[in-house]
Image: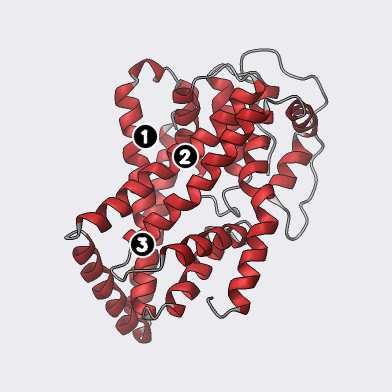
Amino acid sequence: MSSLPLSDLPGPLPTHPAPAAHTPSPSPSPIGAWAVADWHTVRDGAARLGSADPWWLLSGLFFTCMGWVAAALVRQGAIPDRLPPGLLLASQFAAGAANHVLPASIGAHAVTLRFLQGQGVPLARGTASLALYSLVKPVAKTAVLLGFLIAFPELLHLGELVPDRRTLLLVAAGLVTALGATVVLVTTVRPLRRPLLDFVRTALTDARILHTRPGRALALWGGAAATPLLQASVIASVGFALGLPLTWTQVTLALLLASTAVGAVPAPGGIGPVDAALVFTMVTFGAPTGLAAATVIGYRVLTVWVPLLPGALVLSIMVQRKIL
């Protein structure tokens, strides 16, 4: 992972020599690679956390907990079967621990699928619910981003954040290639056709049923739209605790832009690429580099490191009790 492109940003930056190029280890930690690449910025940012306002940090912890509630709502909204609310919430807390070990939400999906099967949900329906969950979240986040851009047009002077034509062409080419490879694979490998058709049929049927139930649709789309707002509230709370000179709106828009730009990178829990893009975006909005880095570090402490051990413990208990 490369260092943050902070040398081109306005404002005073910490002066230190550029990190030397090195060969990454076979399985590097994304956040560890970022810490190595920008050690001075990370060190200064971590030191600032010692003087943070504890009440704002508690507020950030509250919004972190609400994030698990939103995840449970989306999971329930993505499946017609009624799930026990307490166990569903516990499964999402446990899934959070697994999500920071494997990339692209594989850990969280695996835990949720095991939970659904333990509740008697057929494999095809459980898999379809995961696909609907994965589809609705980026669609809802994009809708929230567009809503913010329409509501706050004065924040659109962000030329550095708009991808150029070459980047857009590369993204389009990647999507077309992935779609073409899927079509070729299904066409040439005959054993895949029937399971895939069954999956698509189940997914479309369940999606139609869910959208005829207002409660399920509200849980699905409302929870998905609330998720980035709760994440932004955690970041804003940490920022306010440190004296970050940005508003909640700016922090939210920074997160939406950063996660949309690099959220497709398959890093565990989005750690690494999103962190770097979030620091870059907040600095572009006018935040000092050290404060932006400290805010992101505090955000990861509240959302990753603090819940990690309790989440692993809940995961272990649920496995031992055959809930997963």
Q: Earlier in the sequence, mark 3 or mark 2?
A: 3
107 left or right of 212?
right
Mark-to-mark CA distance, 3 and 2: 18 Å
78 left or right of 227?
left
Residue identified by numbered label 1: 145
Residue identified by numbered label 2: 230
Q: Quadrant of the N terminus?
A: top right
Crowding at label 2, few (<14), some or many (≥20) Cα neighbours within 10 Å?
many
Outermost residue on the bottom side: it is: 191
Q: Earlier in the sequence, mark 3 or mark 1?
A: 3
Residue pictured at 59% horizontal, 40% vertical: 61
Residue pictured at 37% horizontal, 87% vertical: 191
Up/down of 295 relative to 225, above or below: above
Q: Which amino acid does the dot numbered 3 rest on?
A: Gln
Up/down of 47 relative to 35, above or below: above
Residue pictured at 67% horizontal, 36% vertical: 298
Find residue 237 and report its horizontal and vertical position in percent: 57, 30
Mark-to-mark CA distance, 3 and 1: 24 Å
